[in-house]
Image (cartoon, coloured by chain):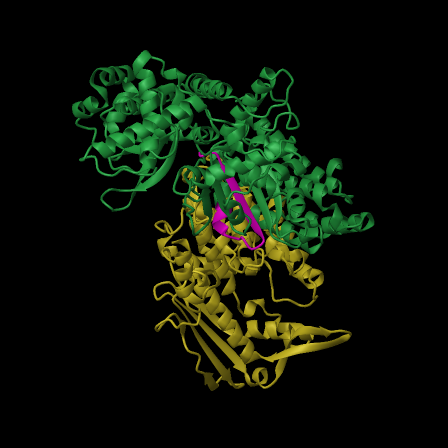
Chain colours: A green, B yellow
Amino acid sequence: MNTVGVSDLATNPFAVKTPENLKPQELVDLFVPYPEYENLQVSGHQFLHGHRGSGKSMMLKMMTPDAQCLTRGCSVKELPYYGSYLSIKATDINAAEYVRIENEPSGFILSEHVLITKLLGSLFLSIKKHCASLWTEQDSHSKIKEFAERVLFKRLSYAGWESSSPQTQPSLSKPQDVIDIFDYIHAETARYIKRRAFSREYLPYAGPLLGFQDVLLPIIDELRQYGLLPDCPVFFLLDDADNLSLQQTKVLNTWVSYRSTDNTSLKISTQMNYKTYRTTSGIKIESPHDYSEINFTSVYTGSVKENYPKLVEKIVEKRLLMVGIKGVNPRDFFPADLVQEEAIQRISEELKARWSANSTGGYRAADDAYRLARPEYIRRLSGKSKQGSRYRYAGFDQLVHISSGIIRFFLEPAARMFADQLKANNGLPVTHISPSIQDDEIRQQCDNLLIEKFDEMKGDAETEEDIPSIDKLRNIIYGLGCLFQAHLMDEEASQRRVFSFIISDTPPKNLETILRSGVRFGYLYEDTIGKKSGMGRTKLYVLSRRLAPAFKLDPMGFSNYLSLTSNFLLDISERPNNFVNRLKTRGARGVLEDSPQLSLIEDFRNE
Amino acid sequence: MTDIPNSQILERIFQAHSKDKSKFPRMPNDYYVQYANFVNLLRADIYPQVDAGLASNSATPGYYTAHNAEHFDEVVRYAGDLLGASEANRDSWDVLSPYELYVLLVAIRIHDVGNLEGREQHEKKCFKFLNMYEQALGGDRAELKVIAKIAEAHGGKINGNKDTIHFLNPQEKVGNITIRPRLLASILRFADEICESRNRAATYALKRGALPPHSEIYHKYAAAIKSSHYGSSERRLTLEFQLEVNDVIRKWGKAILKTGDEVSLEEDYLIDEILDRLDKMNRERKYCNIYSRGVYAVESIRATIRVVDDELDTLEEIPVPELMDAGYPDEDNGKLRDKDGLRAYCGEALAAKMKDRT
């Protein structure tokens, strides 16, 4: 998504710059530590799963030496760990040519070599950038020379490297010289891979082959011994590992399986599309034996989601402060529509009065009344004059809920709101964002997700066969949105606020694939809940609240879930219009009665 | 057809089984011809120089027990014994696939070649030396790397860890052929371990006291081995040591000790050296069994140590117990509840943690 009208953090506090482009001080100023951040900073291999924009890269970048030195107020030498960052997406190793070598005999060996060369190249780049304080200039020449002669050349020669070419003739005295070697080795491999792409015949590889155990680990160990790295564990911060090829992924998993975490740990972030957890020999790596994992999505939409609004609040405060807006409560900066809130309050009073008058209604808390008042307000707007779209998606709390636990989904629309407000203010400073601007932006974001994003996905589809699956996902999302809307509009329904569902039987593979891509592209979120039987747990799929405007749904707080059968979902995926027509004529409860596969709504719960 | 001088049974089995090209990653290649050429090149270029390299290039120069062509032949022979290979089952033998056999044989042939540059880290140089024979071996470095890793696991440490075989994959695909690197490495490693015999001792120099003092005990040990045999049916390694009185009544040099400017000779009795080596062999047995069990396992080591007189009559037989896994395991590895990572999850600690959460 583009950050329209947003140029820079200095002018727009909510501008989203990718963490790779943030200066260390900006990183530190903007970063609000997630509770998981502490866990990530201890030795051990870890996977960090989360949707794009959930803050994974920010967290990894915060673990790089310059950000850590700023945060801790310490020198590189005093760091408790040394984070070397590598964005897989930003490298060329996921190019199609690299995938082709997977069919070569011993392709794994070549894939490992490619990964190691990249990791070492990025480590030495980081050393060049951050570690100069560890040595004096004269000292550095002799240290690097000695390291190169006694360690690097020896290890590389064991790995088949011959330093005969003029570019790599060893006369090393600077970190850049080492970087040049790894660049040269990588270029040599890249040349082979490209040549291979043009050759029908088998073309044997004749360059060096660097490995994790025989080159990477010993080199890291010796870098510490020679004082070229601080004497602390090295963490490789591998961002967006979904972009690795299948074989590279298996190689990475093999390293994880070594559990050699005393001195070197792998911190791997994924965007919910990590290809496999199998190693090169087909063995599955498992948590907690081989690694630990943090799943951002379930953390922020699941059981501990109360942390998320607090986190967004802190982020907004920090960002406002950066542009000189001090002491403003985020709720005042993103105000709700007062008229709307008052109307909802009136409905709440009305509901309370009705419940107390009705002797069979029993006691229901004031909170309950207020919560049910919002869907009722939306229903009344819609029912009276077909003006349901006048409901305003505005106010800090609504915006937080709509962002569905992904901080970027709060910041990007906020940045556009800020730009629009600036324009509307005719040069006057922005003190708050008007509810109408908030509402417009949220609706625009929703349209984008429901229309343009699907077209984009189809355009990006790797094969023609993927397209029907994308269409089916769109149908399911549309059908579910309509189903949830029908519940909200049904005055008589016992549960009106529905945003999620479980599958009551075992889903077939094709349905699982569709739902998995829904999760991957941010239309659905995955969580788990206890089964009603009390035996084990089952997957809960939550519809992204960013879609709330499209279906006139109430995005706030807790909601209920439906228990659906696989056939029901597959039917929607094939014949969405048919389903929606039935909904229109029969209503949500009518569909329930019609469909023997659809079980009754389950108990109210916190999703 | 290229022949291998002094070929061992495993090599003859390989020759017979290599005819089926579909069992190899690259069908146009003749893997037996590759292997035979490789062995002949090593015999001509490298093997004759390994002992001289060891003697002169090691951190402690000395007269090491032989690492000549016969040593490599013997490791191939012992590997054949471990795998139950014999002339009788030459055609039907199928413990390893033909390609696994190729990988094992190449790994054995290269495993100690790094000694040419000195003892230290010799095991890490297999890939470097294999690359010298890249063309003879089919020209694919990636394949050579797989073989080198298997050969390199025969000793030393990988990043401080002696469990070198663990770092290999249980299974690995080379092209469309699956091999078992851990199994192959364990075969090589144990075959190398038990490959000690009188042939490796410098008998002439030993008799005439012409060895450097710090090398004596190693040649004495090798010379004392009368026989070494693995019986695949009983899964037992049987060793016979024969010591003369003169061998046991004095200490023999084994290392040079340097303390500051002072240089002294470390010495030990031969019988103590033998017992220590048997302990080490038993550790290797247990270790390699971890990776070979399922295909074969060496269940015990039975050693007979006799001290004999000039007439070779037995004066004393040392009662060495059979080295095997027997009896109820003791608790010497400590309890789970005392392990570092678990202490925070035991008893009071877990109770307190959970109370905090409620």
Asked if residue A210 lies left or right of residue A178, the reply is left
When the figure is inspected, residue B247 is found, relative to residue B131, above or below; the finding is below
Q: Which residues are magenta?
A: A254-272
Residue B120 belongs to the span the image colors magenta? no
Q: Give the x, y percent position of residue A381.
A: 34, 17
Q: Which of A202/A416 is in front?
A: A416
Residue A581 location, quadrant: top left
Q: Which of A487/A59 is in front?
A: A487
Q: Give the x, y percent position of residue A51.
A: 47, 33
Residue shown at the point (56%, 40%) measured from the top left: A32
Q: Give the x, y percent position of residue B85.
A: 40, 56
- In the rendered image, is residue A205 in sight? no
**Quadrant holding the C terminus of chain B:** bottom left
Asked if residue A467 lies left or right of residue B114, the reply is left
Residue lying farthest top?
A385
When the figure is inspected, residue A279 is found, relative to residue A189, above or below; the finding is below
Asked if residue B160 lies left or right of residue A596, the reply is right
Residue lying farthest right?
A138
